[in-house]
Amino acid sequence: MINKEDLINQLREKGLKLTPQRLAIINALVKNWKAHPGASLIYKDARKKAKSVSLSTVYATLKEFSEKGLIKSLEFDRMENRYDGNLSEHINLICESCGTILDYNLPATVEPKDIARKSGFVVTEARMEYYGHCRDCLKRKA
Amino acid sequence: MINKEDLINQLREKGLKLTPQRLAIINALVKNWKAHPGASLIYKDARKKAKSVSLSTVYATLKEFSEKGLIKSLEFDRMENRYDGNLSEHINLICESCGTILDYNLPATVEPKDIARKSGFVVTEARMEYYGHCRDCLKRKA
DNA sequence: ATCTTAATTCGGAATGATTCCTAATTAGGT
DNA sequence: ACCTAATTAGGAATCATTCCGAATTAAGAT
């Protein structure tokens, strides 16, 4: 779903430099992608291997990577933002008790009941958002 | 979609008190619900009528209302949180240029192309989230 | 109408994830 | 090896939101 070689190749394609810090961050991302890690987990894990990684760099790198499309960022207000290595369309099942985030691949139709049956996750609230540009803004720019 | 009487009735049903501050906030919510207002807009608008509304109260009230299900909160990390008076299932179309949030009622299938055709909103990124409780947490509580 | 009390309010301080700033360092092409 | 734009560190700044403790008040009970 996400792997070291791909990330490094994409990084090079986008004209980004491969630094020891970024390598440590990439390793942490690949190792933890199932957990949808946040900046603090990446920081902690990257530090184990490379002591010279600062929190600023972790933030800058994760931002850079998600802006360039290597990973996807899941943003929250009270919870730490999380990063997702699964770039295909899917639903993130976010546990309000423990913060665990599970992937749920989209079937033809999206039914909370199906989700509960298949994954044991009980949906209490749905959040679907499509980001983009509204008609007025598109018009204003044209 | 949201109206003064309903909000006041629900508030009473939930055992909450109707204060002048809350009335001002309710009026601001009803007046601005199409804009999916944030705390600052509600604060500004509520102040016009009732000078004695503090920002703390606005935050506390919006939090209380969304926890009790009178409104729905849309949470963001860098953007101010926004509040939605449309409690039926729908997609929020969030403009990354100007922050406008439009409602898009769910048809049978959800196609970005259909959205563009009908609303002029061009989707660049999708975000769908179902909140709830994962199997492990449910097990732990039982 | 007054009393009672739990809920509500206020304003300011605290929080905490994230961004910003600036100087120093460095990756990678020439 | 050299150059230069990119990257990094780390500490300060940001900013929406929450927390705090004291004062006020809505609304049911007497």
Image (spheres, coloured by chain):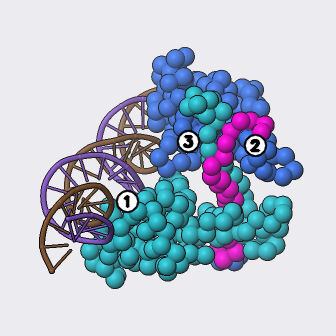
Chain colours: A blue, B cyan, C brown, D purple
- Residue B99, quarter of the rendered image: bottom right
- How packed mark 1 is, by other alpha carbons closer than 10 Å (few <14, some 14-19, many 20 or more), is few
Asked if badges 2 and 1 are on one and the same chain, I answer no
Amino acid type assigned to the residue bearing label 2 in the image: Ile
Residue identifier under label 1: B60
Q: In percent of the image, x 53 and y 65: which residue is there? A: B71
Q: Chain of mark 1?
A: B
Is B139 rendered above or below residue B66?
Answer: above
Q: Secondary structure at mark 3?
A: loop
Amino acid type assigned to the residue bearing label 3 in the image: Glu
Viewer-nearest residue: B24 or A86: B24
> Which mark is first along the chain, 3 or 2?
3
Would residue B91 appear left or right of D7 to someone viewing this image?
right
Q: In percent of the image, x 67 and y 58: which residue is there? A: A129
Residue identifier under label 2: A115
Q: Position of residue A110 (x, y in %)?
A: 79, 51
Q: Chain of mark 2?
A: A
Q: In percent of the image, x 40 and y 73: which residue is there? A: B25
Residue identifier under label 3: A96
Kindly identify which numbered label has been placed on residue B39: none
Is B43 rendered above or below residue A57?
Answer: below
Q: Which residues are magenta?
A: A117-137
Amino acid type assigned to the residue bearing label 1 in the image: Ala
Q: Position of residue C27 (x, y in %)?
A: 61, 28
Can see residue B44? no
* Extreme residue toward the top, this view: A49
